[in-house]
Image (cartoon, grey):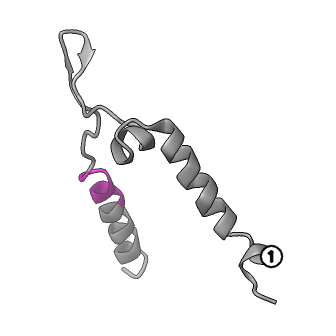
Amino acid sequence: MNILRPCLGAALALLLSGCLEVNQHPGWRQGEYAGKRDELHYQRNFHGDKLAWSAAVTDRTLLQNEYRRANP
């Protein structure tokens, strides 16, 4: 009786572990991907201006340098 309860609990856990699997792949319509189109960072945030995006990333990188941030 003492061995039966843990075995039943383990069997129940294994049985229920696969019940909530959800299909996460978008469908295909007429042979083409029907999901959301992914945009690049500079296309979404900088209206397609790759040079402005590159300058913003460079400026942000320079501010992360501890030697440049310190005021002696």
Q: In the rendering, at what x and y percent does residue 22 appear?
A: 24, 45
Tell whether position 16 is magenta: yes
Q: In the rendering, at what x and y percent does residue 56 appear?
A: 54, 54
Q: In the figure, 6 relative to 17: above or below?
A: below
Q: Residue furthest left?
A: 29
Q: Is residue 71 left or right of residue 51?
A: right
Q: Quadrant of the C terminus?
A: bottom right
Tell whether position 6 is magenta: no
Q: Is residue 60 left or right of residue 31?
A: right
Please give the count of numbered marks on the rendered protein: 1
Q: Which residues are magenta?
A: 14-20
At x 76%, y 74%, the residue is 68
Q: Would you name the residue on which mark 1 appears? A: 67
Which element is circle 1 on?
helix
- Given residues 6 and 31, the one toward you in this image is 31
At x 35%, y 76%, the residue is 5
Q: In the rendering, at what x and y percent does residue 42 appear?
A: 43, 41
Residue type at mark 1 is Tyr
Q: Residue furthest bottom?
A: 72
Q: In the rendering, at what x and y percent does residue 6 appear?
A: 40, 75
